[in-house]
Structure formats: structure tokens, C-alpha cells
Amino acid sequence: MNSESILYIIIGIVTFDFFFNQALDLINLKARKRNLTEEAKEFYDEETYARSQEYQSVRSKFSFLSSSISFIASILILALGGFGYLDSLLRPMIESELVLSLAYFGVLYILADLFSLPFSLYSTFVIEERFGFNKTTLKTFVLDKVKGYVLAAIIGGLLLSALIFLIQTLGNSFWIYFWVIAAVFILFTNLFYTSLILPLFNKLTPLEDGELKDRIIQYANSVNFPLDNIYVIDGSKRSSKANAFFSGLGKTKKIVLYDTLINNHTIDELVAVLAHEVGHFKKKHIVFGLFISIGQIGLMLFIMSLLIFDKETSLALGGSQWAIHLNLLAFGILYSPISTVLGILGNMLSRKNEFEADDYAKSTFDSLSLQKALKKLSVDNLSNLYPHPAYVFVHYSHPPLLTRLANLRK
Ligand SMILES: [Zn+2]
């Protein structure tokens, strides 16, 4: 295929993706119910409900504005050959093709981050602030950025170097070798996320002695879950929104409860949330998810191996010659329809897993306490009670509140 056709396909994909997401956002916004419904009256008051409507609407408008600007910027950069231009600026300065690719992605990363900075500042310090969610100080924000940069440089730099080195030395069969590296990396991250990465951003502390711990011990013993794996995280450092999650495998497995969750829920509700997380472990959702992501990466690398040596693809982005980094970039866009479909399938599986974890909490602890906790979480986070089914189908990793409640009442 010639470079011009490839460019049209790339622009077509970016354009379709933009309009597809805007259409979904729009029908989702239209699906809102203005007035408090009978069902919601039970746990929402008029004022909070109105605030949640306002929050959805402000977030949607902001997302429309930011994605429109980034869509226009992407189209301009693609049409004017901006990616190739950056390559032609860096190329005379750098001898080694490997270093050139690393520098190229480094510069692109910084430019993209600077571009998104005003949006992320506005989202945190204006929107989240206005609705009382923001607890991030400017200092935490800056430190997070710095840590993010260092992590991206180390982890991204190492993985990218390995990938480019394998492409250069092995040719087409690079993908099998890099697949092994990626699989080991994912396994490692899963094992050590809560002990290596998370402590860089948050403080993890074992559960304090007291009634909550006693009740959790009681529950944990009843289902054979080791208690020393339950931690509390200082989520309140960034946001008042609450959460809990499960992470790790085998001996490194941990259930992490946000301090914001503990502050706002009764002991019964907390044990119910914990029971839900234990359910994810007992039903082997984590291990299964790991195999799926390793499989997906294999597929992605294989398809990458079919495109990575094509000179026309580099020319399509405005390059003057074949360059690995230009082809990687183009591949990222060309592959995005496949990753969208895989993402939808992944969300379907995740929603099924959520029902299973809810059922586990219901059968080993108590359905009513979990229902109360879920309602409280939804109200405190001003979540959308009536998302459009099509929006849920594409974007939701968790079933909407009312569907979960119906399932728990069964
Ligand atoms: Zn869950």
C-alpha cells in the first residue's frame, strides 16, 4: 500500500474514533433522568441528586472540549507530517538508530504531557475542587508528575530499548522474544505492584487494631483468607472518592482499602466490600485476567511484526525514510480499532466478574450490607445512576449501581 493510502486510513481511524466516542457521550448525557426517580429516592436526597446531575454535565462538557482540541491537533499533525518533521529534526543530531528512537519517544512524551497539562490541572483543581472531591495539593500534583516522569523514563526506556534492539537484530521474529519479555514484565508488575510501585505514590499501612480488624479477622477466618494481606492506603491524599481493590498473586496478594472508604462506612459495610474483593481472589479473576492480557499482547506484537518493516508507513507520517519509531507510532493508531474491540470484550468479562464477586460476598457474608455500601459509594462519588446501555457496553468495567443492586436482591 502506498504512503498516501496509509495516511488516509490513519486519519480515518482517528476521525471515526472521535465521532464514535462523542456520539456515545451524547446519548449517555441524554439518558440522564432529570428528576429523582422512586428507586433513587430511597438513598438520594433532591439536593445531592441535582449535584450529581450537575457533575455529570460539567464532566461531559469538559471531556467534549478536551477531546475536540486533541482531535483537531492530531489531524493537523498527521496532515502536515508533524511526526516526520520531528524525526528530521532529531536525526542529524543522533548517530545511533536506537538512541534516536528513544529520544524521539522521549520528546513526544514531554510534548504530549505539556499539551495535556492545562486540562489535567483544570480537571483536578477546578472541576473536582468545585464538587468537593479534590484533596490534591499543588505539591502532590508536581511530585506525582516528577515520579511519573522518572518511572516512564526507567520502565518505558528499558522496555522500548529491548523492543527496538530485538527488531533491529532479529527482524520479523522479534515479536516472540519480546512477548516473553513483556509476559515476564506483566507478571512481575502484578506480583510487586503494591510493594514497589504503589508506595512511591501512597502510604500503605496494615489495618489498625480495633473492632473493624476483629470483625475482618472473623470473616477472613471463615473463608480462609490470610489477614496479614489487608492494607489501608491514604487515598485521602488526593481525593475524597473512596475505593478498594485486590492486587497481586500467591504470597504477594493484598486487599487494599482506601482510608476514605473506612471513614465513611459502617463495619458491616466494610466487611461486605472486603468480602467482594476476596471474591475476586477466590474466583481466580486476577490469574485469569493476567493470562488474557498476556495473550492480547502476543496478538498485538504479531500484528506489529507485519507492519513494522514497511517503509511506506514511515512515509505516511511524513518521514523521509523508514524509521522504527515512526512505524511504532503509526502502528499504535492502526491497531486502535482492534484494541477498542478487545477493550469492550474485556469490559464484558470484567462486569461478569463483578457480579460473581458480589454473589460471593452475598453468600459468604451479607447481601444487604453490600447493597448499602454500594449505594453510599455511588452517592458519595456522584456516579451516574442512569448511564445509557450502549455507553455501559463500551466503557463500563463495573455494572451500573441499579443493575448490581437488582442482582444482589435476587
Ligand atoms: Zn470488584
Image (cartoon, helix red, strand yellow):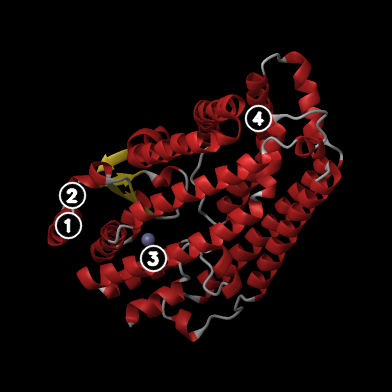
Report the residue marked by disc 2: 227
Question: Between disc 1 and disc 2, whose residue precedes?
Answer: 1
Q: Amino acid at mark 4?
A: Phe
Report the residue marked by disc 3: 354
Question: Between disc 4 and disc 1, whose residue precedes?
Answer: 4
Q: How many marks?
A: 4
Q: Amino acid at mark 1?
A: Ala
Contact, mark 3 vs mark 2 (Cβ under 8 Å): no
Q: Amino acid at mark 2?
A: Leu
Dividing the picture into quadrants, the one containing residue 78 is top right
Query: Considering only vertical position in the picture, is 325 above or below 243?
Result: above
Which quarter of the rendered image does ligand 1 occupy? Answer: bottom left
What's the CA distance linking mark 3 and mark 2?
22 Å
Q: Nearer the viewer, mark 3 or mark 4?
A: 4
Report the residue marked by disc 1: 220
Contact, mark 1 vs mark 2 (Cβ under 8 Å): yes
Contact, mark 3 vs mark 4 (Cβ under 8 Å): no
